[in-house]
Image (cartoon, rainbow, N blue to C red):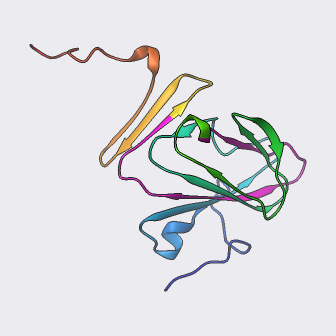
Amino acid sequence: MAGANVYRLDLDEHGELNVREAIGAERIGATVYELAPGKRICPYHWHVAEEEWLYVIRGTPTLRTPDGERVLREGDVVVFPVGPDGAHAVTNATDEPVRVMMISNRAEFEMCVYPDSGKVGVWSPGVTLMNRIENNLDYWDGEER
C-alpha cells in the first residue's frame, strides 16, 4: 500500500501534484495545489459527474460558491456536490502561498459548466471538448437525414 504526506510533497513547476498517481489510486482523484498570491486553481465552475472536496492544508484561501465568498482556514474541509449548487472557485487573496488539496471521485465521463464565461467542458476516454454554449451545433449539422 503506497502513501504520501501532503505536508512534504514535492510539487511540479506549476505548484501541483497528482496525489492519485503518486499513491497508485484508481477510483478517487486528489491533487495538491500551492497557490501563489493572487492565483486560483481554476475558473468558477460546477461538475456534472464528480463530487469534489477541498481540504485546506496551509494558509487562508478564499472560496467562491453560489452563496458568495468566504475565507477558509487551515484544516477546513468543504464539499462541492454535483450540479449548479456545487459551483466553486478557490483563490489566494493573501500575500503568502496557500496549499490545498482537491479530492474527487473519478468519473469516466465528465462535464463541467463555467457560468462566468459560458463555457462547457466535456471529458471522456479519447475526447476532450471545450466550447461556449452559444457555439453549440444543431444535432443534424454536417449529417444527412
Q: Is residue 87 left or right of residue 40?
A: left
Q: Residue furthest right?
A: 95
Residue 94 drawn at (x, y percent): 88, 46
Q: Residue furthest bottom?
A: 1
- At horizontal 41% and vertical 68% (from top left) the residue drawn is 26
Magenta segment boundaries in residue numbering: 86-112
- 85 and 109: which is toward the camera: 85
- 107 and 6: which is toward the camera: 107
Q: Is residue 30 left or right of residue 131?
A: right
- The reply to whether the magenta stretch includes residue 37 is no
Q: In the picture shown, does residue 92 fall above or below 59?
A: above
Q: In the picture shown, does residue 80 fall above or below 24?
A: above
Residue 55 drawn at (x, y percent): 70, 60
Q: In the picture shown, does residue 1 fall above or below 101?
A: below
Q: Is residue 143 left or right of residue 45?
A: left
- The reply to whether the magenta stretch includes residue 96 is yes
Q: In the picture shown, does residue 7 fall above or below 139?
A: below
- At horizontal 78% and vertical 49% (from top left) the residue drawn is 36
The mark tally for this picture is 0
- At horizontal 88% and vertical 53% (from top left) the residue drawn is 96
> Residue 135 lies in what quarter of the image?
top left
The quarter in which the C terminus is drawn is top left
Residue 23 drawn at (x, y percent): 51, 75
> Residue 59 lies in what quarter of the image?
bottom right
Residue 30 drawn at (x, y percent): 56, 62
- At horizontal 66% and vertical 70% (from top left) the residue drawn is 10
